[in-house]
Image: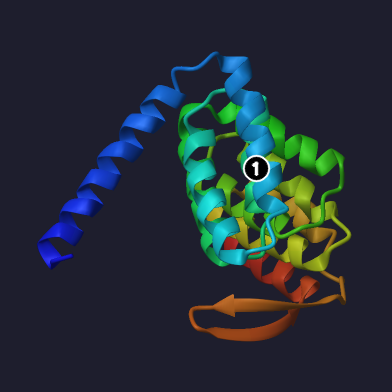
Amino acid sequence: MSLTDQLRAIFDAERALRQAESQLLQADHKSLEDLLSQAVAAAKAERDPYEAELRLTRLADLCAQVPGEAMADALLSILDEEQPSVRVQAAEALVDVAYDRYAEVARAIERALARNDDGPAMQELPWVLAEVAEPSAVPLVTRFLNHTNEEIVASAIEALTRLGDPQAVQALKKLVNDPRVVTVEEGDEEFTSTVGELASEAIEVLSE
């Protein structure tokens, strides 16, 4: 096959993908929710990392196009993956959904907090909320400060700093003596800090 034929094959595949996606999204809403939820569960159980990544990144895009709490829960499930490329795709999809249908995402996050979820998604969600920066973001991110996982708490502290709302100071004061050690990424570098040190730094920034 020539290079021209290979390029044409890519265009044909993209055209077929768009047509198939358009037809799928016209299906009955409940049937579509059930199908995508089951597909997410199956993809997360997939043993082949390449196949799992392929399916989950595509499913993140599809779930984002379907309204409803089941799809918000499915996106959180996809976000709770170890593969960075999958988490990036899911986080971007959640941000897009939150800009249009914030309540769906907020309620899904509240359910995750109520279950005391402890996976990778919980470290990403404060940043999703900070990116959208709705008025209710601060009290919702503040709830992450009560988590038993110190890395999740650290993520919430950094997200609150980014939101820049002084209302978070009172909640952060409860952590200034927290001795738990966390790893913090800054650019390409990593360093360790205590939760208390992060909280104190955040209070200083938010009090300026």
Q: Position of residue 82 (x, y in %)?
A: 66, 64
- Vertical comparison of 177 with 159: above or below: below
Give the residue furthest to the left.
4
The quadrant holding residue 157 is bottom right
In depth, the one of 88 and 195 nearer the eye is: 88
Q: Position of residue 141 (x, y in %)?
A: 69, 47
The quadrant holding residue 103 is top right
Q: Position of residue 29 (x, y in %)?
A: 56, 16
- Vertical comparison of 6 with 138: above or below: below
Image quadrant where one finds the C terminus = bottom right
Q: Residue at x 56, y 58 (%)?
A: 51
Give the residue furthest to the front.
1
Q: Residue at x 68, y 62 (%)?
A: 155
In this picture, residue 164 sits left or right of residue 109: left
Q: Residue at x 56, y 30 (%)?
A: 102
Q: Is residue 208 visible?
A: no
In this picture, residue 12 sits left or right of residue 18: left
Which residue carries the number 1 mark? 40
Type of residue at label 1? Val
In depth, the one of 149 and 179 nearer the eye is: 149
Q: Residue at x 70, y 79 (%)?
A: 183
Disc 1 is placed on an element classified as: helix
Q: Position of residue 74 (x, y in %)?
A: 65, 38
Q: Is residue 46 visible?
A: yes
The quadrant holding residue 5 is bottom left
Image quadrant where one finds the N terminus = bottom left
In this picture, residue 187 sits left or right of residue 1: right
In depth, the one of 185 and 165 nearer the eye is: 185
In this picture, residue 18 sits left or right of residue 120: left
